[in-house]
Image (cartoon, helix red, strand yellow):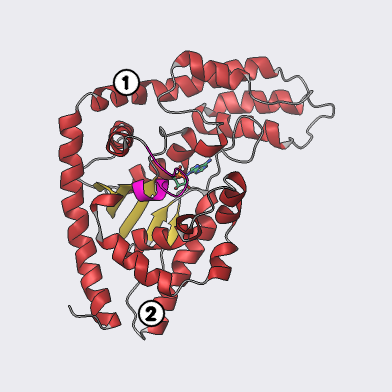
Amino acid sequence: METVVSGIRPTGNLHLGNYFGAVKNFLQMQNDYNCSFFIADWHSLTTTAKPENIVQSARTILAEYLACGLDPDIATIYVQSDVKEVLELYLYLNMNAYLGELERTTTFKEKARQQPNNVNAGLLTYPTLMAADILIHKAVKVPVGKDQEQNMEMARKFARRFNHLYEVDFFPEPESFYFGKEAIKIPGLDGSGKMGKSDGNCIYLMDDEKTIRQKVMKAVTDSGPTKANSEKPEVIENLFTFLDIVSDKETYDFYNEQWNTCSIRYGDLKKQLAEDINKFCAPIREKIKEYSANTELLDKIAKQGAEKAQESASKTLKEVRQIIGFRP
Ligand code: AMP
C-alpha cells in the first residue's frame, strides 16, 4: 500500500483553506493508502518565536482532525515533536540544501516580508523540515493545497539529491496529491490571494453562525457587471469559489446566471453563502466541542499515533544512517 503524509501547523484553528486544501483529500484517502497525518508543532516555531500552550494547541488541532472524520484506527495521527527521528533526517537533508535555493522559495520570501524582525534559520530551512516530514515515512503522495507546490518540488529535489549523492534508489520522489483537476487554493474573503492564518482572513471550522455571517457579509466585492457574460474579477471569482465548494450546483448555477445577465445582487449571494458555509461547518463544530472536552481520549490517540509513526520513522532512519556510513 502506498504511503501518504500531510500535516498542518497548530498556530490556530483549522480554517476552510486547511479543510479543502488538505483534510478533505486526506479523508478520501485514508481507507486506500497507508496514511500519516501529523500536527506540525515544530513548524509553528518558525513564525511564532515563543508559542504558548504548545500541548493544548496540538490537542485543539487533533480534536479538529477527528471532528472532520480522520480515523485514528486507520490512519496514523501524531504530533510532529513526538517523532524525534524527523530531526535527524532534517539535519542530513540540511547538509545538502543550499542557501540560494532556500532563499528563492516563495514561501520564505513571503514570510520574510511578513516578519522582517524574525527571519530565522528555521524559516529558511522550512522546506527541508517539510521534506524530512515526508521522506521519513518514504511517502509517495502528499495531499496539500496549491500554496505548497514549490515546497513539494524542493522535497523531490532533496530526495533525488540524496539518492544521487549516495548512489542509491532509496527515497521515492513524493508528489502533491488532490482529487480534482488541480491543487485547490481557497481565497481570502478580503480580496487577498489566499486564506491563511497569518493573513487574518480566515473562516474557521469552529466559527459560530453569527461570526460566519459577519465575515461573509464583509467580503470585498465590486460595483457589479456592466456587460453580459463578462469575465469575473478576482474578488468575485473568489465568492464563486466558495459557492462551488459549499453550495449545491443549482445555487452556483443560479448566481452564475445572474452574473451573466448582470442582475446579480451581492447581498443575496453573500447571505446564501453564509448560510451554506454554516450548514457545512455546524456538524463539524459540534463534534469539535465533543472531542475537545475529552482530553484523555485525545492524549491516548496522540500516544498511539506517536508509537506507530516512530516505528516507521526509525526504520527509515536506520537505513539512512547505514547509507551515509554512520554506526547503525
Ligand atoms: P498551514 O495552515 O500553513 O499549516 O497549511 C496546512 C495545509 O493546509 C497545507 O497542506 C496547505 O497547503 C493547506 N492550506 C492552507 N491554506 C490553504 C488555502 N488557502 N487553500 C488551500 N490549501 C490551503
Q: Quadrant of residue 258?
A: top right
Most foreground residue, 205 or 108: 108
Give me the residue at 42% from left, 28% from top.
205
Task: Give, as a three-letter code, the residue at label 2.
Answer: Asn
Is residue 182 at least partly visible in the picture?
no
Q: Which segment is the magenta one?
A: 40-51
Q: Which residue is mark 2?
A: 163
Give me the residue at 40% from left, 55% from top.
142
Q: Position of residue 108 (x, y in %)?
A: 56, 55
Label 1 – label 2 distance at C-alpha: 47 Å
Most foreground residue, 266 or 249: 266
Q: Nearer the viewer, mark 1 or mark 2?
A: 2
Q: Confirm whether the magenta stretch covers residue 46.
A: yes
Task: Give, as a three-letter code, the residue at label 1.
Answer: Glu
Mark number, residue 146: none
Q: Secondary structure at mark 1?
A: helix
Q: Secondary structure at mark 2?
A: helix
- Side of 268 relative to 32 (left or right): right
Q: Which residue is mark 1?
A: 286
Q: Earlier in the sequence, mark 1 or mark 2?
A: 2
Q: Position of residue 204 (x, y in %)?
A: 45, 28
Q: Confirm whether the magenta stretch covers residue 118.
A: no
Q: Residue furthest bottom?
A: 167
Q: Quadrant of residue 166?
A: bottom left
Label 2 lies in ligand 1 vicinity (Cβ under 8 Å) = no
Q: In this rendering, is residue 17 above or below 165?
A: above
